[in-house]
Structures are given as structure tokens and as C-alpha cells.
Image (cartoon, grey):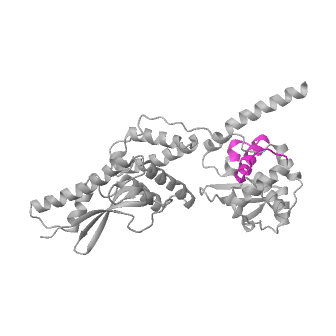
Amino acid sequence: MKYPITKIIFDRKNQATKKEKAPVSIEIYFERKRKYISTGVKLYSNQWDDVRMVKNSMDMINLNKRIKAIKGEIDDWILSLMEQDKPFDWGALDRFLERSTHSGTNFMDFAADMIATRADIRESTRKTQRKLITALEDFGKIVEFSDLTKANVMAFDDYLHARGIKQTSVYSYHKFLKTYINEAIRRELINTNPYLGLRLKRGESEEGRFLTEDELNAVRGADLPSDTLKRVRDLFVLQCLTGLSYSDLMDFDFSKVNLRRGQHVLSECRNKTGVSYTIVLLPEVMEILERYNNELPKISNQQYNLRLKVVAQAAGIEKPIASHWGRRTCGMYLLNKGFTMEVVAKVLGHKSIKTTEAVYAKILDKSVEDAFRKLQQNKG
């Protein structure tokens, strides 16, 4: 009877470079047919040697152990067929892989597949969540379902902090990871949640990413040397008065604006989240739109942010303003004018008022302190 041959294959599609990783797989060859089993290990081109296997990696000993263990498990199963004089067939291999601890779909593949196929998230969210897979690949200690331990989750947290990632982003990585752990539990792929008993700090968003009313007026009145910068200013002022994100700004369609009781109203859904928002276009916004025949100029986000720095400099503002500052400025402007959190949440398209409160509560505290300080200075 004939039996399959197994070998370790790196980068079978010749995609690896010093900047792009490629997988290490176990090839099973039998009667001119090949099957490739994932090891969950991905490496750069300079991290593999056909003799030594993984090299130039801090975790190369553990990664080599993992690769050898997976191949060894398959080899042992084939050897058992020989000893029992049983024939090999691909169906029996698939059944073995489903039972196997290491082989078949691992947690990383499971999470990556879910991210790629979920129909309930937007492409922008999908792109963000793919960063989890990249981080897990680089971390290297959470690959299999059996790797989902409390110790490894804490080590992953340390790894993210060691990379200099801010706490709010670290929290997001954990939030994404927990989503797919919970899904694995729901599908009975694992029994326990490694996050049970762990308390992770959400972190605080950067404060002060908004312009005061005086600073916004300075932007309005800045002497700008080119029409391009004037167009960028118009876009930013419009953001500050509508709360539109860059993505929604670029997709602005005046034909969707309705005239209601003498006011121009736009009710749409945010590109990023799909959550609905409603804004009233103020007279200044209408003036800006009229300048461009109701069709706003188009510009890439990178070029927009680059030119906003020049606009800020011309306005005498020493803040690193960017497109998302317009949205934050709008929220602060409305709150300072007496709008309720509920109304601001609807204008900005926040899914929950808690999001609005989380973003603006600390900023408002500081705003109150600054107002009282200014009052005392005026009295003095």
C-alpha cells in the first residue's frame, strides 16, 4: 500500500519579501495530489532557512517547535495507518485534522476568516480589524485555540504597549480579540474565556482636538495665498459647522438636502458606521456651497490634512489640526451654544449618547475651568 509524503514548505506562492510575510505550511503529497495544512506561522523572507527553519526571530525556538509538532502529529497518524495496514484516503485525513489539536483551522485563521466574511460590518471596520490579525502574527503566541490563555492575553497586552501603542488603541485590539473569542465559545471551539477576571483600561482619548470659537474665527479670517488653501479652509469650516467626517464630506450630495420649514436639512447615514445623522445647514454653510455650485471640491485625506496645517499656521493657531478636528469642533460648538447631548449625538451620528458623553465630558470639564479662569482674569 502507498502512503503520503509530508514536508515543510515556506512561501509556496513566492510572495515573501523583507516587508511582506508568507506562511509556513505542511505539504501532504499523495498520488499527484497535494494538500497544504496551515501551521499558523508567517515569516519574512529573511526569517527562513531550509535547514534551520525559522531564524532571525526572538520566538524562533517556539515557532520551530510548533511547526515540528504539527508535522509530527500528521506523520504519527500516517505511521499508525501503516502499522494497522489501513489504506490512506483524503477523507480520513480531513477527519483526523478536525480532531487534531494543532492541525486544521486554528484561532488565527478562524478570526481572519470571520473578519473577511462578516456581512454585518463595513469595509472600513473590516480594514481596521485586520490589524488584529497582523498584530497576532507579529506577536506569535496566540495562533491555536489552545493558545487562548489568560497568560497569553496579558502577554499580548504587554506586547502592544511595548510597541508604543496608545491605551485607547490597545483597548480596541482587545475588544476585537474578545469578539472572536466569544464567537469561538458560541461555536463550542473553546470552553473558557481567557478575559474572565481581567480588567483592562479603556484609556482616554486625546483631549483638546478641537478649535475654540476664537480659533475658528481666526481660520475664517486668515489671509491665504492660494485658491487651493481657500478651498481647504471652506471644507474645514463646513466640517466645523456640520460635524461631517472626511468620508461623509467627500460623499456630500446636495440633492439629498431637503427644505423643511425654511431650513435646509440633510438626513443621511455615516459611511463608517451606517448610523443615521441629521444636520441643518446654517447660512454660512449655504454660502460655502453656493461658491461651488453645491458641489464641494474633492481632495485626498492626506493632502487635505497637509494643507490644513498651512491654514492653521496662517491663522496663527499652534495646534496640529486635521480633518477630524472639524467634527470635534462642531460638537463642542453646539454644546457651548446650549444644545443637549442627545441633539449633538444625533447631529454627529453617534450610535449611543454614551459615545457622545465619553468624547466630550472631560473636554467640557476643562472648558468650564477655562471659562471661570477667564472670568476671574477679567474681574482682576
| Image quadrant where residue 10 sits | bottom left
**Residue drawn at 20 percent across, 64 percent down:** 92
Quadrant location of the C terminus in the rendered image: top right
Look at the image and give the residue range highlighted in magenta: 316-344
Q: Is residue 261 visible?
A: no
Q: Nearer the viewer, residue 315 or 242?
A: 315
Eyeballing the image, is 297 above or below 279? Answer: below
| Residue 188 spot, x, y in % from top left | 32, 50
Q: Is residue 226 left or right of residue 7?
A: right
| Residue 265 spot, x, y in % from top left | 75, 59
Q: Nearer the viewer, residue 52 or 361?
A: 52
Main SS, magenta residues: helix
| Image quadrant where residue 123 sits | bottom right
| Image quadrant where residue 368 sits | top right
Residue 264 colored in magenta in the image: no
| Residue 253 spot, x, y in % from top left | 72, 66
Q: Is residue 288 left or right of residue 245?
A: right
Eyeballing the image, is 378 above or below 54? Answer: above
Residue 324 colored in magenta in the image: yes
Q: Is residue 359 left or right of residue 67?
A: right
**Residue drawn at 81 percent across, 50 percent down:** 312
| Residue 320 spot, x, y in % from top left | 74, 47
Q: Is residue 41 visible?
A: yes
**Residue drawn at 70 percent across, 51 percent down:** 324
**Residue drawn at 28 percent across, 70 percent down:** 34
**Count of marks, rendered view:** 0
Taking the view exactly as shown, the residue that stands out farthest to the top is 380
Quadrant location of the N terminus in the rendered image: bottom left
